[in-house]
Amino acid sequence: NFEFASRIERVEPSATLAISNKASELEANGVDVVDLSVGEPDFPTPQNVVEAGKDAMDAGHTGYTPSNGIPELREAIAARLREGGIDAIDEEIIVTPGGKQALYEAFQVLIDDGDEVVLLDPAWVSYEAMSRLAGGSLTRVDLEPYSFQLEPGLDDLEAAVSEETELLVINSPSNPTGAVYTDAALEGVRDLAVEYDITVVSDEIYDKITYGVEQTSLASLSGMGDRTITINGFSKAYSMTGWRLGYVHAPSALIDQAAKLHSHSVSCAVNFVQRAGVEAIENTDDAVVEMRDAFRERRDMLAELFESHDVDVPIGDGAFYMMLPVDNDDQAWCSGAIEDAHVATVPGSAFGSPGHARISYAASEDRLREAVGRLAEHEYI
Ligand code: PLP
């Protein structure tokens, strides 16, 4: 008979869980499931990074590190951020076990009960949960009418924000739409943030995965350096999901607060993983480009396949997701698709956009072809 804290009762279990449970259940019964539900590159971690991790372990880098991260990695991150136009120094960075922890710390440090958090829908599932855990009150701006682009949706964003808004979350390239926001859109965000004194979380975890466009870091825009919390991580660009490595960059006053939470909760990111992170940043650009190009080919192939079935899917210029328009009851569509066609996707309603299914194209071309074939055969498209 536990009396659970209200903060945890405000949060639902992850929506992808039901899908992955179903997929595992089917697979345990010998069914071949095409799993397009996971937000994870299907490439191995580049070998030089693996070696760097092993070497670090062999060299005895297995103890605690300074809570905010080893100096070499914080310096390498700061240098990378400066290349992206952010005026960063290592003291403004905390190295975290994954971008998720970095985001969690940002929400915990800024959001009090009732503070307004603004999300652009469809939005990655965990922003809502993190806001709820912190006691935030959510306002959601729907970008679906604008094919998920922010620039034409700026008026809607302006109507949603006010002096009361504490935090706005921007995620470009976006999970789940793949949209990469234009500079004009980001400048629009800047103007609103400055006018209404809003802090912005810029989740740039897919920044290296863009197709023919460049991602702009929000904190590089004039007026944004002192009001942006930049989040990034190694999971997607370097195919390092299980290593758990990410970071937060923010003005030092905010970092000082987050550092308290960090040191009292996770202590530090894993020592040898941080050392592998230095290798990832410094010597892995070619592998990143190879993976990016493979994602681009898959995106184009998948878009053509859907087109050949007369399905019109908005295509983004980044990340490795697309939002397939489906029945209004997207939960039923996704449950049916996995049961009948054995294709796993995530209901758009989990991202605040019912009527869609999120497809991850971090899968081989054969599996993508197989998935579309099965969806067509079972009349899901
Ligand atoms: N932000 C977005 C938009 C994501 O899609 C993810 C992972 O799915 C994360 C952050 C967190 O990734 P990680 O904690 O593995 O760095």
Image (cartoon, rainbow, N blue to C red):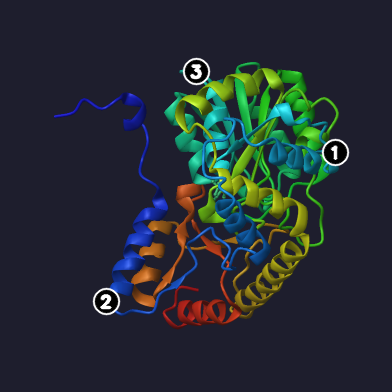
Residue bearing mark 2: 29
Q: Amino acid at mark 2?
A: Asn
Q: Element type at marker 3?
A: loop
Q: CA distance from mark 2 to mark 1?
A: 52 Å
Q: Element type at marker 2?
A: loop
Q: Quadrant of residue 90?
A: top right
Q: Amino acid at mark 1?
A: Gly
Is residue 13 among what the camera can see? Answer: yes
Horizontal side of 202 relative to 333 (left or right) equals: right
**Mark 3, other Cα within 10 Å: few <14 / some 14–19 / many ≥20:** some
Residue, far front = 59
Locate residue 283, reporting x and y percent.
Answer: 76, 57
Q: Amino acid at mark 3?
A: Asp
Locate residue 363, reporting x and y percent.
Answer: 56, 71
Tell which tag, 1 or 3, sits nearer the viewer.
1
| Residue 47: mark in rendering | none
| Residue 112: mark in rendering | 3
Residues 78 and 161: in front is 78
**Mark 2, other Cα within 10 Å: few <14 / some 14–19 / many ≥20:** few
Mark earlier in primary sequence (2, 3): 2
Q: CA distance from mark 1 to mark 3?
A: 31 Å
Horizontal side of 68 relative to 10 (left or right) equals: right
Residue bearing mark 1: 85
Examine the rendered structure and indicate whether residue 27 appears above or below residue 256: below
Mark earlier in primary sequence (1, 3): 1
